[in-house]
Amino acid sequence: TRGKVSAQCSIANVGTQYQELAANPATKGTILDLCSDDWSKLLAALAQKIIADTRKSAFDLSDPLDATKTIEVSVNGTAVPTGGYTLDAASSKIVLSTAYAPASGQELVITYSPVK
């Protein structure tokens, strides 16, 4: 919080350096209100962020990208829509959006098929 003071909570010093560190995309931090009356919501939000941040979303392709082939992607048998991933031809990688990144133990399948 940015200096929130209430009857239930007062802050001697606001940790602006911690806030700056948390706001930096490279550190993937988060800012939560320590004066909150219900920490269960804060901890649940933090847990979801940890899960999302630890999911691997970029994968090396075993075959180079080929314009003569279409690619189908699925996670645990569920198709990932075209907008759910991007292909990086330069590095031969597929990058899945956070919503489709597989969790630990889930299977990612990439199928190459000739263009019809």
Image: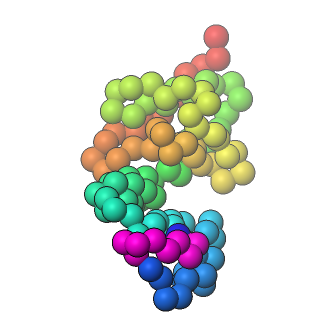
Q: Pick out the residue farthest to the bottom.
A: 12
* Residue depicted at x 54% and y 26%: 81
Q: Pick out the residue farthest to the top.
A: 116
In the rendering, at what x and y percent does residue 35 appear? 41, 70
Rendered view: 115 above or below 34 = above
Rendered view: 71 above or below 15 = above
Q: Nearer the viewer, residue 63 or 103?
A: 103
Q: How is the image coloured?
A: rainbow
What is the magenta segment's predominant secondary structure?
loop
In the rendering, at what x and y percent does residue 29 appear? 52, 68
In the rendering, at what x and y percent does residue 104 appear? 31, 51
Name which quarter of the figure residue 44 lies in.
bottom left
Q: Pick out the residue farthest to the front.
A: 7
Q: Nearer the viewer, residue 30 or 111?
A: 30
Q: Nearer the viewer, residue 19 or 86?
A: 19
* Residue depicted at x 46% and y 38%: 100
Rendered view: 102 above or below 43 = above
The answer to whether residue 4 is visible is yes
Q: Nearer the viewer, residue 66 or 3?
A: 3
Name which quarter of the figure residue 64 lies in.
top right
Find the magenta span and give its range.
2-9
Name which quarter of the figure residue 78 lies in.
top left
In the rendering, at what x and y percent does residue 55 appear? 41, 53
Of the 4 image quadrants, the one containing the C terminus is top right
Rendered view: 64 above or below 44 = above
The answer to whether residue 51 is visible is no
* Residue depicted at x 45% and y 44%: 101
* Residue depicted at x 60% and y 27%: 82
Q: Is residue 101 magenta?
A: no
Q: Is residue 31 left or right of residue 82?
A: left
